[in-house]
Amino acid sequence: MKSKDTKNIQIINKDGKPEFAVLLYKDYEALLEKMEDYEDQLAIEAFERESHESYPSEVIDCLIEGQNPFKVWREYRDINRQDLAAKVNITLPYLSQLESGKRKPSVDLLKAISQVLNVDMELLLFGESTEH
């Protein structure tokens, strides 16, 4: 799907303003694939830009595959869930929700987790927050 090709897109207006865009399913799938590729590229660029530490390819592969970054980095640092939750002053269920993608952290919590895991905050934001 080309960015300027709108012949297969229907715009539905509400009160004179665009409310919905309806597109072919194949175009929707292509859009999702481009978005995933873009997220992967951002992860790689941020890693190269911000990283002063070398990480095993297995860690990077997990992030690129879309595994939850909180869990990936916690496991890489060999910190169990209970210890991480205690160190950042949250409950274990809250951490479980972060690692499953059901909740998003506040900026302060993201900063605290990044400090405990000794990883840049940006590296905790990569990929989808779903388990594969």
Image (spheres, rainbow, N blue to C red):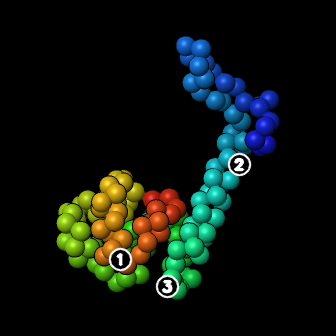
**Residue type at the position of mark 2:** Ala
Determine which residue is flagged by label 1: 117
Real-space CA distance between mark 1 and mark 3, rounded to the nearest whole angstrom: 13 Å
Q: Report which quarter residue 19 is drawn in.
A: top right
How packed is label 3: few (under 14 Cα within 10 Å), some, or many (20 or more)? few
Residue 23 location in percent, x, y?
69, 33
Image quadrant occupied by the N terminus: top right
Judging by the rendered image, the residue that carries numbered circle 3 is 53
Tell me if 79 is positioned left or right of 129 in this view.
Answer: left
Mark sitting earlier along the chain (1/3): 3
Outermost residue to the top: 15
Residue denoted by label 2: 30
Looking at the picture, which amino acid does disc 1 mark?
A: Leu
Q: Secondary structure at mark 3?
A: loop
Task: State the residue at coordinates (80%, 36%).
Answer: 5
Amino acid type for the residue under numbered disc 3 = Glu
